[in-house]
Image: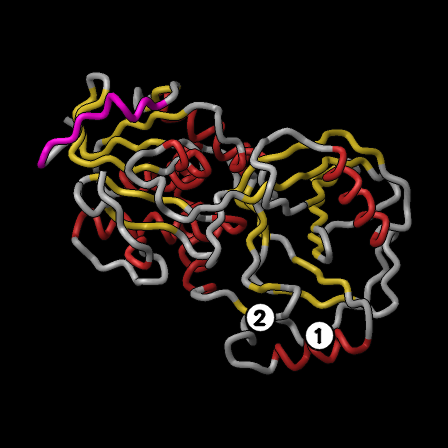
């Protein structure tokens, strides 16, 4: 018997798997390719909501743990996946500059907003009002993380590449059984796939489709992350990842002409140089209307747990949320209400 059966091999499930390794807990992880939002995600981590120059709740704590957590993973799998990189916000007016300074004066925001205006010439971008710099930013290569870590699990015999059949899960008072696997607890980290989960499909997870490009722009000499109406992430060799759109109605991972036109229009608002679209990707983010994660256990079956709702900030929220759920599962540590599924009406199966 293993301690955990983890269902889902995206950022959430892999973060929980890593915590099992760190704490000497045995597990098996079941995943398929039905949800790809972790693979195609921008992977940025940024403590500031740049539309309003406001901070995220627990941002400092999340970033502190993020650095430690991904560093441990890099040592485990022997590959760099975390890339600290400055993030610039292009100003479109003097008023935006003033709003930036006002925000930076707030104690909550001081650690994250530089008060030194960045006055640099970036070929390919016209910025007469210059840039603001957000501190403690970077990106996680999410595709490399998912593929490398899943390969690591596979080599250890801990990965099962198959679709999970909820109807064959047998729940007992102190354990669960699934296709020959006996586990003390089950952790569902299925992303948007939660809608097919009979134990947690009542939770208000409303997936948001996002579309992204990989572009080639030889004239663009950008070495930092740019975040305005879209983000532009330098990948090296004249290649950049650009995104993302937000569609609350389409729940497929198929790129659309509408999404393409929206991204092209936004890119042209920022770049004053030619670019070529190399690839066009789409995925459905697991988002909740209150923008908080879904953590906790089922009302009737305490050994069935959920780790979901990481939304657009999975790189930051993943390790932090997985640790909260792990401590809850192992020690009964209370999950704060704004992260817990207790804030929503429970439903029995």
Is residue 21 among the parts visible in the rendering? no
- In this picture, residue 273 sits left or right of residue 214: right
Camera-nearest label, 2 or 1: 2
Name the mark on residue 116.
1
Q: Is residue 171 magenta?
A: yes
- The magenta segment: 164-173
Q: Residue furthest left?
A: 173
The alpha-carbon separation of the residues under discs 2 and 1 comes to 18 Å
Q: Is residue 310 magenta?
A: no
Badge 1 element? loop
Is residue 261 among the parts visible in the rendering? yes
Q: Is residue 339 above or below residue 240?
A: below
Mark 2 or mark 1: name the one nearer the start of the chain.
2
Quarter of the image for the N terminus: give it. top left
Q: Is residue 314 above or below residue 39?
A: below
323 vs 311, nearest the viewer? 311
Residue located beneath label 2 in the image: 54
Quadrant of res 348: top left
Colour scheme: secondary structure
Q: Residue at x 41, y 40 (%)?
A: 73
Q: Is residue 136 above or below residue 302?
A: below
Quarter of the image for the C terminus: give it. top left
Badge 2 element? strand
- In this picture, residue 82 sits left or right of residue 16: right
Point out residue 148 in the picture as x, y percentages from the top left corner. Answer: 47, 28
295 vs 289, nearest the viewer? 289
């Amino acid at each position: 018997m293993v301690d955990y059966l983890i269902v889902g091999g995206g950022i959430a499930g892999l973060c929980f798997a890593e915590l099992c390794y760190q704490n000497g807990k045995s597990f098996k992880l079941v995943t398929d390719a039905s949800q790809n939002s972790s693979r195609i995600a921008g992977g940025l981590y940024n403590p500031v909501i740049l539309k309003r120059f406001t901070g995220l709740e627990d941002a400092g704590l999340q970033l502190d743990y993020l650095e430690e957590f991904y560093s441990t993973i890099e040592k485990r799998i022997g590959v760099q996946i975390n890339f600290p990189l400055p993030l610039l916000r292009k100003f479109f007016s003097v008023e935006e500059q003033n709003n930036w300074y006002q925000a930076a004066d707030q104690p909550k925001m001081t650690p994250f907003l530089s008060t030194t205006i960045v006055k640099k010439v970036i070929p390919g971008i016209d910025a007469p009002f210059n840039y603001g710099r957000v501190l403690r930013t970077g990106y996680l290569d999410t595709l490399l993380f998912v593929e490398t870590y899943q390969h690591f699990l596979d080599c250890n015999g801990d990965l099962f590449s198959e679709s999970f059949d909820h109807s064959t899960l047998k729940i007992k008072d102190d354990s669960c059984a699934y296709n020959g696997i006996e586990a003390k607890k089950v952790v569902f980290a299925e992303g948007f796939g939660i809608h097919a989960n009979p134990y947690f499909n009542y939770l208000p997870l409303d997936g948001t489709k996002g579309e992204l490009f990989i572009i080639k722009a030889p004239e663009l000499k950008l070495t930092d992350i740019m975040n305005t109406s879209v983000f532009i992430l330098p990948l090296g060799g004249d290649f950049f990842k650009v995104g993302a759109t937000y569609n609350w109605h389409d729940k497929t991972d198929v790129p659309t002409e509408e999404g393409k036109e929206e991204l092209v229009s936004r890119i042209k608002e920022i770049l004053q140089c030619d670019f070529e679209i190399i690839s066009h990707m789409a995925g459905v983010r697991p988002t909740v209307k209150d923008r908080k994660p879904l953590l906790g256990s089922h009302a009737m079956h305490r050994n069935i747990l959920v780790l979901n709702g990481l939304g657009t900030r999975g790189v930051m929220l993943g390790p932090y949320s997985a640790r909260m759920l792990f401590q809850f599962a192992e020690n009964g540590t209370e999950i704060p209400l704004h992260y817990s599924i207790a804030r929503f009406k429970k439903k029995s199966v």
